[in-house]
Image (cartoon, grey):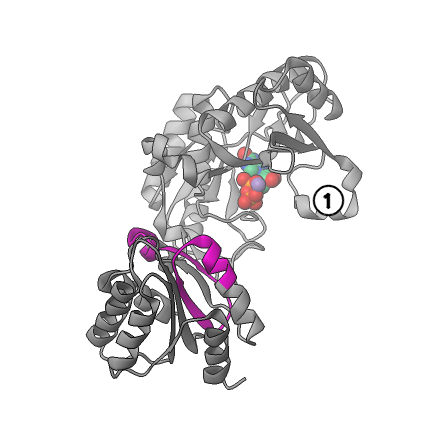
Amino acid sequence: MNLHEYQSKELLAKYGVRIQRGHVANTVEEAEKAAQQLSDETGAKAWVVKAQVHAGGRGKGGGVKFSPTMEKLKENAGNILGMQLVTPQTSAEGKKVSMVLVAEDVYYPGETETKEFYVSVLLDRAQGKNMIVYSTEGGMDIEHVAEVTPHLIHNEVVDPAVGLQGFQARKIAFNLGLEGEAFKDFTKFIVSLYNAYVGIDASLFEINPVLKTSDNKIIAVDAKVSLDDNALFRHKDLAALRDTREEDATEVEAGEAGLNFVKLDGNVGCMVNGAGLAMATMDIIKLSGGNPANFLDVGGTADAERVQKAFGIILQDKNVKAILINIFGGIVRCDRVAQGIVDAYKAMGSLPVPLIVRLQGTNAVEAKQLIDDSGLPVHSAITLEEAADKVKEVLGN
Ligand code: GDP
Ligand code: MN
């Protein structure tokens, strides 16, 4: 689950990470109030208006605007609110902006130059450890840095059992070329950041840029936080931060129905129980010359209601040319699943694409009989090969 920049920053601040402060606004009037309030609190003389959408590269798309006066701030807020923001990380149609963050300007001139760094914290699955990835080349596209100057990207592996050690924090600050007050401030910053990452069960932090201000403070100017969905059960407060407007509508609907659904690009819709079987089903669709249109795990119960819901979700995808149901009946007997499919089909009246059903396990033969006797135009199969052949047949391959 991804968070907005403003939500990410609020969480980081709770762990003592210094952030670029700001307030959110949904209208130009609110933006003006937010700016005024921010100036009262922080003494900010200028502001930035930042579109709040789940996509990076907002600056490039015109979603981040420096605002040196109140007039300019209102103009920028007016332009960004309601805009369809296209960035290198959105689709061509972009994302609608319904909220902005009015933040204090932290790039003010001073005794020393400002510097932008890149810092991320993530899980390194291969090593089973956390990793801090950092670079002196902050503020820009890190993928580009990785391609052109990979030697400027460093890794620091952190053993989760002992946490980030002082010497590691100092090493990172040193590699970023920091000294004096900024060096000290950075070591505090990175320790707090790492503690936040562990504390909220995140799977990714990306802070780009981390800024060294002209008066040598270290600040998170941007913040992208992804939370580990599997840990949300112990963070009810964080689960409430979900903004479903930013997610794929079909996946949200499936999630609410308790279906595990991921949309893919192919033409064969799949309805399967169990993640392993779902993966195998996608393989067999490929082998038969088709392409899976989705991953859909209906879970333990495949009654008429759930099957009907799953049909509805699969059929929202106009690329779907056939549906393959592949269910292993263990505790849930195949004949009961078959009855569920038949009932769902009858309740829907008709399906716009051919349906192939493969039921294996307890009472598989009875289940096939039940489907064959239903009078519905369903292709039934017991073995995987049969199912694959039927998919091939209906696709005309
Ligand atoms: P992103 O484009 O989605 O990654 O959004 P960021 O939050 O990283 O902002 C994009 C860029 O806006 C930053 O790299 C900065 O160069 C600039 N920016 C952000 N905050 C300020 C600010 O307070 N003052 C000024 N002058 N520029 C800022
Ligand atoms: Mn950024």
Nearer to me, 63 or 135: 135
Query: Where is 173 relative to 210, above or below?
Result: above
Q: What amino acid is found at the position of numbered circle 1 in the picture?
A: Ala
- Residue in the image at 45% along x and 71% along y: 383
- Neighbor class of circle 1 (other Cα within 10 Å; few <14, some 14-19, many 20+) is some
Identify residue for label 1.
Answer: 146
Magenta segment includes 255:
yes
Q: Inspect this view and state whether residue 168 appears.
A: yes
Horizontal and vertical percent for residue 332?
Answer: 29, 56
- Kindly indicate the quadrant of the structure image that contains residue 274: bottom left
Is label 1's Cβ within 8 Å of ligand 2? no
Nearer to me, 8 or 385: 385
In the rendered structure, which segment of residues is drawn in magenta? 253-280
- Residue in the image at 43% along x and 78% along y: 321
Horizontal and vertical percent for residue 51?
Answer: 46, 46
Secondary element type, mark 1: helix
- Looking at the image, how many numbered discs can be counted on the residues? 1
Q: Is residue 256 left or right of residue 91?
A: left
- Kindly indicate the quadrant of the structure image that contains residue 139: top right
Query: Where is 18 relative to 376, above or below?
Result: above
Query: Where is 300 relative to 37, above or below?
Result: below
Q: In this view, does 158 lie to the left or right of 311?
A: right
Horizontal and vertical percent for residue 2?
Answer: 45, 43
Query: Where is 139 relative to 186, above or below?
Result: below
In which quadrant will I find the N terminus? top left
Horizontal and vertical percent for residue 54?
Answer: 46, 47
- Which quarter of the frame holds ligand 2? top right
